[in-house]
Image (cartoon, grey):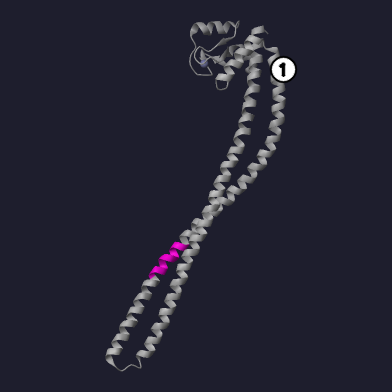
Amino acid sequence: MSLYLKQIEQLAALQKIDDEIMQLNAFLKNAPLELERMQIRSSELRDAVKELNEKIAQIVGQRDQLDKDIEDAGLKIKKSKNKLMMVSNSKEHQAMMREIDNLEKMNRNREEEKVSVMEEIVGQEESLTEVQKELADLQQEISQKKKQINQKLQSSKERLKTLQGQRGEAEEVIPKPILSRYQFIHSRLSQPVVVFVDQGICKGCNISIPPQTYNVLQKGEQILSCPNCHRIIYWAGHFAEEES
Ligand SMILES: [Zn+2]
């Protein structure tokens, strides 16, 4: 294998290590944030449960009051009807009839109101059940996530140590100027830094490289960068046999 190909291979190996380091670091950074978001949501849901319970208690109170009023008015009606039989004065009789009518009308209104209050209780209880289910699911998810994070935190830290060691080894065998070029690009561009060119197209930016650059690249004598995205490029054909 030529020196050029060896260097490309070393760069690709370094790239692979850096990819994994980046993924691990992203996990270590994002997992606690994700957990925090879940906990915020969980506290919102707990507040919602509290609010719904308060609302339901209030509506149940309304219903109980209606029941009491209906019962009280019912007793009054009964009393008045009993009295009515003993009244002989027609003026007094009429006044009592009006009072009974009035009480009965009020109770009909209360019964109607009670129907809508009962419907509202059912609706609020349905919402409560939904929120409680979401909360229970989320709490289960949170406890799983915590377990997962703790496990992965430990293994990631160990893996990172290994990768940093491998990275140091890879850096030692790559010539200084090429390594600094890699590091320069690495600090400025999103991953990956080392990409292959297939049929004239850079896999880093998916744009064709000039034919002249492509010809030089295929000769495999010097390490080139994509004129468009500046990533280090190599010709896929050089590694075609190994990859297939
Ligand atoms: Zn490119």
Place of residue 178 in the rendered image (x, y in percent of width and height, measured from the top left): 62, 11
**Region rendered in magenta:** 112-121
Place of residue 129 in the rendered image (x, y in percent of width and height, measured from the top left): 53, 56
Place of residue 225 in the rendered image (x, y in percent of width and height, measured from the top left): 55, 11
Q: Is residue 194 visible to the viewer in this orientation of the structure?
A: no
Place of residue 113 in the rendered image (x, y in percent of width and height, measured from the top left): 39, 68
Q: Name which residue lies at 47% across and 63% down.
A: 121
Res 183 → quadrant: top right
* Label 1 crowd (10 A; few <14 / some 14-19 / many >=20): few
Q: Is residue 139 above or below residue 80?
A: above
Left/right placement of residue 87 relative to residue 40 reads left
Which residue is denoted by mark 1 in the rendering? 169
Amino acid type, callout 1: Glu
Q: How many marks?
A: 1
Q: Is residue 130 above or below residue 157?
A: below
- For the stretch drawn in magenta, the main secondary structure is helix
